[in-house]
Amino acid sequence: METPRNIRRVFKSTPTIEGAGVKLKRAFGFNEVPLFDPFLLLDDFRSNNIADYVKGFPWHPHRGIETITYMLDGNVKHGDSMGHNGVISAGAVQWMTAGSGIIHQEMPFGDQHGKMGGFQLWANLPASQKMNPPRYRDITPEQIPQLHLENGVEIHIICGNIDQTKGPVNDIAIDPNYLDITVPSGISYTHHLTKGHTAFAYIIAGKGVFCHQDETYSNETLILFDDGDTITVTTEDNHVRFLLISGKPLNEPIAWQGPIVMNTQAELSKAFREYQNGTFLKQHT
């Protein structure tokens, strides 16, 4: 018998500044560890003001994590220590596995109207994979399947699967699902999740009711769910669009400072020591 999930916690994203002065909203991060295990952080960098994002994220290191960038509007130009260069454009995804270490930069630039919109999710790597070679998955909008259900619900599958339809990203240790779901007005939609996996929704437009609760939630609200098999989303006179993200908890210790996440303080200290003395990169151009 299926068990519906309930709401465990509700968060409102908060303003913060990162990189060289990028103004963004943080849905969750360091202070919420290990509540979102295996996820570490979710940043929302939507803005119509060029000054909010133009300074970007100059060269910085990562080790021990994966960064997943999903763009709705505008572009992010990136380059790294392995010689990769490119642009993440509207509708595209970059799934970067930092692994043993990479140094990169991410420089946002808006569309022709200065509009910028996107999200960056950090996912933890298990201890057994933290020192694996870095790798990228660059996913174009055309590679992301779109489901149009009979009730009008639309789902973009970035990672994971719904029935026989699979997203373009696989072979990830935490078995994640990353979906962009729009539920039209006047609809009740029930979505199946893997029991035992951490799951949360981040609302990016409209408003809706989750898990049959009385309260209506809207843009920039994050809902963390209890365990179970399903969640139900209900709308009345407005649609709701949200990111639905889930994954298998690692249940491992976390030592985290800035852009590096390891399992022990000794590993963390070693990473920063290597960064200072020039031995951080294990894979070169």
Image: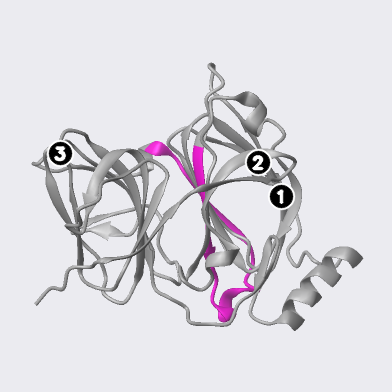
Numbered label attached to residue 104: 1
**Secondary structure found at label 3:** loop
Numbered label attached to residue 78: 2
- Neighbor class of circle 1 (other Cα within 10 Å; few <14, some 14-19, many 20+) is many
Q: Can you give x and y, in whole percent of width and height, for residue 65 in the image?
A: 59, 65
- Badge 1 vs badge 3, beta-carbon distance below 8 Å: no
Task: Give, as a three-letter code, the residue at label 2.
Answer: His
Numbered label attached to residue 236: 3
Query: Above or below — where is 170 with respect to 142?
Result: below
Instruction: Identify the residue at horizontal 18%, vertical 37% (top origin).
Output: 184
Dot 1 or dot 3: first in sequence order is 1
Residue 271: name its quadrant: bottom right
| Front tag of 1 and 3 | 3
Task: Give, as a three-letter code, the residue at label 3.
Answer: Glu
Instruction: Identify the residue at horizontal 54%, vertical 77% (top origin).
Output: 126
- Neighbor class of circle 3 (other Cα within 10 Å; few <14, some 14-19, many 20+) is some
Tell me if residue 119 is in the magenta stretch: yes
Left or right of 12, for residue 111: right
**Secondary structure found at label 2:** strand
